[in-house]
Amino acid sequence: MSKPSPARHLAKEGSGHGETTTGRNLARHPRPGEAVIKAALVACAGFSILTTAGIVFILGKESLAFFGQVSLLEFLTGSVWQPTIGRFGILPLATATLTTSAIAMAVALPLGLMVAIYLSEYAPWRLRQFLKPALEVLAGIPTVVYGYFALTSVTPFLRGIIGTDRIEVYNMLSAGLVMGILILPLIASMCEDALSAVPGTLREAAYATGATKHEVTTQVVVPAAFSGLAAAFILGLSRAVGETMIVALAAGAGPNLTLNPLKSAETMTGHIVRISGGDLSYDSIDYSSLFAIAATLFIVTMGLNILSRRIVSRRREVYE
């Protein structure tokens, strides 16, 4: 005669109490702590959304007041920015912003990628645990310190090499170089995270075919992490476009339509800092123009962020 199974015996014992053992183990217990945490997370998300919506509302409201007096075509294509005579062409400010950002990315991209490759693929574990936090310390230095460093150290150094008659005291080259140092930790850290996320099995498979360390890094790891690297580059560019204090202190204090990095020019963020510190009446067109510039910066950075997300979603590699 066969013996009853243990599962049936447990179920029989539990039936006297109105539920099985399995039912008692899987019963949901009240967890008030999780409900509080969930409510706090929802509140934080809602606060972030409302803050962004408030910023967009204020920018849109003040920008519409500005564009009620200045045409959008003149704003985007005009080559002169002189509010005193009613000329509001953003090209001089935009070209200075693009020039300093391009110089910054020319410095930060190759250096950041090389630092990330070294930390991810070549550095010993203990050295990596020391170097990465030390590198990220640079991101915690106030940008005003970088600005004065560019003005008091980098600019005299460049003038000594290039010549005082060829490079101005306030110039876009100095500001761009220091901006590259500023965003270097951001790009290096994000690139290192993307490279470290590549599965080790890909490296082992490449080594099994006889590939060298350099070949594995350049032909396997870097292409596999392309989406993360591209996102890091674009976010670094967005950070450079929105930088304020370095360009305000070192690039110049007057709009200048030029692509020569040795010349002085004012960026969009630098102009906002300089003009907002003056005596502007609330209803003046000069005051509204600051919000039009800020809205332009907002659209540019938002576009860059959307582009980075699209690149990540399209080029992302998913490994089992």
Image (cartoon, rainbow, N blue to C red):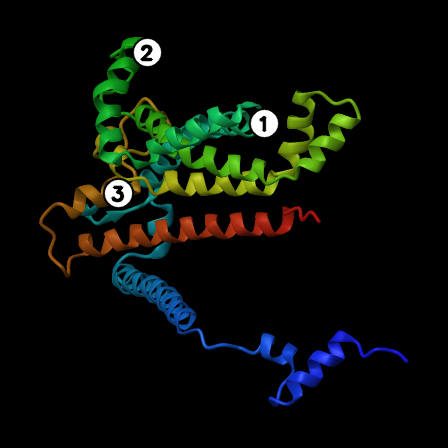
Viewer-proximal residue among 5 and 201: 5
Taking 204 as reference, is 78 left or right? left
Q: Residues within 10 Å of mark 3 (few under 14, many from 20)?
A: many
Q: Could you tell me if residue 55 is visible in this image?
A: yes
The mark lying in front, picked from 3 and 2, is: 2
Mark pair 1, 2: CA separation: 38 Å
What residue does disc 3 label? 81
Residue receiving disc 1: 121
Dot 1 amino acid type: Glu
Number of numbered labels in the structure image: 3
Q: Quadrant of residue 153?
A: top left
Q: Earlier in the sequence, mark 3 or mark 2?
A: 3
Most extreme residue toward the front is 1
- Calculate the distance from the C-alpha at mark 3 to the C-alpha at mark 2: 30 Å
Looking at this view, is 201 or 94 the one in front? 201
| Residue 59: % across, % down | 29, 60
Looking at the image, which residue is at 40% across and 74% down? 32
Under tag 3, what secondary structure?
strand
**How far apart are the two marked residues, 3 and 1, measured between alpha carbons?**
49 Å
Residue 83 in the image: state x and y as whole percent. Answer: 20, 47
Q: Residue at x 76, y 32 (%)?
A: 205
Q: Which residue is mark 2?
A: 162
